[in-house]
């Protein structure tokens, strides 16, 4: 099924959602996790992205996150993010469910964004309820809570931690209603996020995948469009426009 036929499906579906992963932000200069130059090739996640690692060495974890934050704060949305925002403004895409913590969907104009893994732009206190949206990486690391003095941590989900329940419940509610899901730029190996396309499929929904190479979700996809999100998604939107303006 090529882009034209995908566009016809998208133009005619009743409740379209998207699930995105690091691949959609690759064209914004943000490293993915499991690609050839992925973060997990250079760093060990269990040393940097777990509660145990943070307890053991908060300074090391904060040095890594300060480096990642410096990349994210400089990054700009790309045509892939903008294409999803346009599909939402056309009334076709209901919501973006993202595993990404970079906030680029919101900066691209998407209004409904469910952040399953939190946001690297936000910190929270390890002791009290203090939370803060940052505009730049902290200068002092590890940063301390201005309210109670305890350590602040990135407001992201680490391995072994539960997803924010409101985000997960919203994602399940959306996928339970969806008759199509656009899966973009994810290796599909991290649960429970990767179970969402199966949820859509389980009630007869269509799974459309955009990725530069097959993923763990390609077997459940009805359509696999091979290519960069920043190139494929705008082409889909252009074709969808032909159908909706007829
Ligand atoms: N366009 C589309 N897909 C791309 C592009 C691109 N330009 N570049 C890379 N990809 C694909 C890769 O082929 C891969 O399938 O994006 C996917 C990125 O996979 P991962 O690096 O595993 O990222 P992701 O699936 O988002 O990881 C899920 O794992 O480490 C945790 O919390 C972290 O949210 C992350 C989760």
Image (tube, helix red, strand yellow):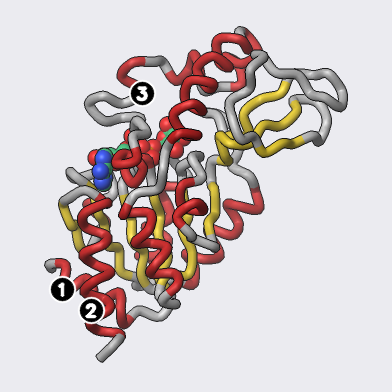
Q: Residue at x 34, y 30 (%)?
A: 31
State the separation of the CA atoms marked 1 and 2.
6 Å
Q: Quadrant of ligand 1?
A: top left
Q: Do residues under tags 1 and 2 come within 8 Å of each other at their CB atoms?
A: yes
Q: Earlier in the sequence, mark 2 or mark 3?
A: 2
Tell me the quadrant of the picture where the N terminus can be found: bottom left
| Badge 1 element | helix
Does any portion of residue 189 appear in the rendered image? Answer: no
Residue 136 place in picture, x, y as percent: 59, 30
| Badge 3 element | helix
| Badge 2 element | helix
* Ligand 1 closer than 8 Å to label 3 CB: yes
Q: Earlier in the sequence, mark 1 or mark 3?
A: 1
Q: Residue at x 64, y 34 (%)?
A: 134
Spot the residue most to the bottom. 246
State the separation of the CA atoms marked 1 and 3.
35 Å
Q: Which residue in the protein does label 2 denote?
A: 8
* Ligand 1 closer than 8 Å to label 2 CB: no
Give me the disc on residue 188: none
Give me the disc on residue 4: 1
Q: Residue at x 48, y 40 (%)?
A: 102
Q: How many marks?
A: 3
Does any portion of residue 147 appear in the rendered image? Answer: yes
Give me the disc on residue 39: 3
| Label 2, residues with CA under 10 Å away: few <14, some 14-19, many ≥20 | some
Q: Do residues under tags 2 and 3 come within 8 Å of each other at their CB atoms?
A: no
Residue 169 place in picture, x, y as percent: 60, 57
Spot the residue most to the right. 148
Which quadrant would residue 245 be assigned to in this image?
bottom left
Q: Residue at x 31, y 26 (%)?
A: 38
Q: State left or right for residue 125 relative to residue 65.
A: right
């Amino acid at each position: 099924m090529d882009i034209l036929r995908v566009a016809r499906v998208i133009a005619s579906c009743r409740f379209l959602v998207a699930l995105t992963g690091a691949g959609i932000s690759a064209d914004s200069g943000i490293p993915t996790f499991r690609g050839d130059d992925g973060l997990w090739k250079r760093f060990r996640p269990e040393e940097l992205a777990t509660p145990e690692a943070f307890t053991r060495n908060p300074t090391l974890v904060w040095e890594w996150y300060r480096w990642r934050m410096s990349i994210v704060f400089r990054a700009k949305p790309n045509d892939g993010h903008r294409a999803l925002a346009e599909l939402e403004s056309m009334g076709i895409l209901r919501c973006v469910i993202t595993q990404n913590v970079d906030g680029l969907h919101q900066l691209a104009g998407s209004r409904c964004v469910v952040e399953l893994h939190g946001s690297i732009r936000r910190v929270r206190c390890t002791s009290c309820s203090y939370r803060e949206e940052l505009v730049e990486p902290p200068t002092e690391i590890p940063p301390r809570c201005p309210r109670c003095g305890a350590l602040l941590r990135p407001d992201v989900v680490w391995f072994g931690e539960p997803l924010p329940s409101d985000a997960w419940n919203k994602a399940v509610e959306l996928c339970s209603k969806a008759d199509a899901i656009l899966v973009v730029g994810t290796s599909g190996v991290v649960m429970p996020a990767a179970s969402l396309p199966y949820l859509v499929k389980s009630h007869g929904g269509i799974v459309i995948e955009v990725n530069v190479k097959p993923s763990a979700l390609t077997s459940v996809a009805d359509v696999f469009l091979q290519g960069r999100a920043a190139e494929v998604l705008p082409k889909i939107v252009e074709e969808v426009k032909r159908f909706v303006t007829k």
